[in-house]
Image: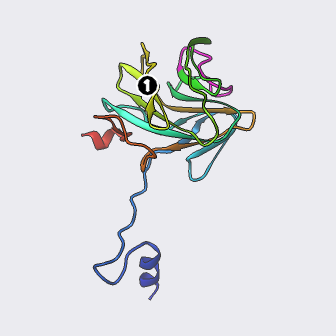
Amino acid sequence: MFCCIRNCFDGLGFTSTSVPRKEINPILLDNTHMGHEVVIVKNGHRICGTGGALASAPLVQSKSYFEVKVQQSGIWGVGIATENADLNSAPGGNDQESWVLCSDSTMRHGKEELQKIAETIQEGDVLGISYDHIELNFFLNGKPINNPITGIRGTVYPALYVDDGAILDIVLDNFHHPMPMGFEKIMIEQSLL
């Protein structure tokens, strides 16, 4: 009897028309690679507090894509970083290990402003991030920003930074907008083989 009840909660049923269980994406924000004052909630998909966090899987495939939704405004940065990035400050881009688009519409790396985009990013907007090991590109609500960052070296991970009340959600599948042509959601290295 207990197994039947458990199967019901697990999404298994008694007929062939049962709804299959949704596969859970094992990639999430990594609580072992986050700043000291960062809080990760919503099953590893939401960041708040002060500082940054990396995702639990590196961008190993040739063309990867993920999204970030700005749930609440504040100071924030989204992009990619190595495991050696400073995750105790925001908005990122404060070292040689992170490349981010920030809440003030600037792209930063190595404590320098690389470029400023014309678009203003607001609460509720969705940022798409694509990386092909040559260029890091950003999309605002499905539209390309067309200001790539190049010259990135090393193994990188999705990186989110927050401060001053900002709340960000990382979206790793079931995207809000279509992925750029040829790009895929982030895959774990074993699934590439």
Identify the residue at horizontal 54%, vertical 21% (top origin): 98
- Give above or below for 187 relative to 87: below
Find numbered disc 1 in the image and state the secondary structure of the residue it sits on.
Answer: strand
Tell me if residue 51 can be seen.
no
Tell me where residue 169 sits by quadrant: top right
Tell me if residue 118 can be seen.
yes
Residue 129 is situated, as x and y percent measured from the top left of the image, at: 45, 32
Location of the N terminus by quadrant is bottom left
Identify the residue at horizontal 55%, vertical 23% (top origin): 100
- Main secondary structure found in the magenta portion: loop
Residue that label 1 marks? 137
- Asked if the magenta segment contains residue 88, the reply would be yes
In the displayed image of the protein, which residue is found farthest to the left?
Answer: 193
User: Quick check: 36 left or right of 43?
Assistant: right
Tell me where residue 149 sits by quadrant: top left
What range is drawn magenta here? 86-98
Residue 33 is situated, as x and y percent measured from the top left of the image, at: 57, 35
Identify the residue at horizontal 74%, vertical 38% (top origin): 165
User: Quick check: 140 left or right of 132?
Assistant: right
Identify the residue at horizontal 42%, vertical 19% (top origin): 154
